Image: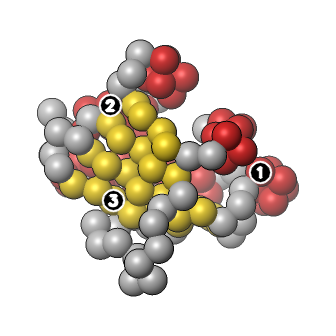
Amino acid sequence: MATVEECRAALDKLVEHFDEISEEDRARHVVERRLACRISDLGVTFYGRIHRGGLDPFKEVPPEDGRPAEVKLTLKSEDLVSMVNGELDMGRALLGGRVKIDASLGDLLRLRKLL
C-alpha cells in the first residue's frame, strides 16, 4: 500500500505529464470537467479540474462551489502509483476491475485519447 504522500506525488506527476500533451490535442479532446480520484484503501479523495489549458493540481478539499465531479475514479493507492509510473496499463486495470471510472461515455472516449 502506498501512502497519501506517494499518491499526492503521483497525481502531481500526472499533472506534469498532462502538460506535455500538445495544445492541439487538448483543444481537440478536452472539455472542462471536475475530477474526483478516490483512493479506496486510504479512504482519501483528491479533487482536480481538467480544462483546455491543462490539469489543475489535485487537492484533498472538494471545490468550493459544491458541484459534484463529472469524472470519478476509484482505485487503490498502489494502482494509482503504478499507472502514473507506466507500470500498470489503464485498459488492463479497467478490465481487471482494479480501476473504476464513473463518467459519461463521451468523457471516457475523450480521456482515452489523452491517456
Vertically, is 78 above or below 33? above
Label located before the other in sequence (2 or 3): 3
Q: Is residue 89 among what the camera can see?
A: no
Vertically, is 92 above or below 57? above
- Measure the alpha-carbon separation of dots 1 and 2: 25 Å
CB contact under 8 Å: marks 2 and 3: no
List x then y, in percent, for residue 6: 24, 47
User: Alpha-carbon neighbours of circle 3 within 10 Å: few (<14), some, or many (≥20)?
Assistant: some
Q: Is residue 14 among what the camera can see?
A: yes
Q: How is the protein colored in the picture?
A: secondary structure
Residue 29 - label: 1
At numbered mark 1, what does the secondary structure look like: helix, strand or loop? helix
Residue located beneath label 2 in the image: 79
The N terminus lies in which quarter of the figure? top left
At numbered mark 2, what does the secondary structure look like: helix, strand or loop? helix
Q: Residue at x 29, y 56 (%)?
A: 45
Residue located beneath label 3 in the image: 46
List x then y, in percent, for residue 87: 41, 23
Label located before the other in sequence (3 or 1): 1
**33 or 50: nearer the viewer:** 33
- Measure the alpha-carbon separation of dots 2 and 3: 15 Å
**37 or 79: nearer the viewer:** 37
The C terminus lies in which quarter of the figure? top right
Query: Residue flagged by tag 2: what amino acid is it?
Result: Asp
Q: Residue at x 17, y 50 (%)?
A: 43
Q: Is 94 left or right of 64, judged from the image as shown? A: right
Vertically, is 54 above or below 22? below
- Measure the alpha-carbon separation of dots 3 and 1: 23 Å
At numbered mark 3, what does the secondary structure look like: helix, strand or loop? strand
**59 or 5: nearer the viewer:** 59
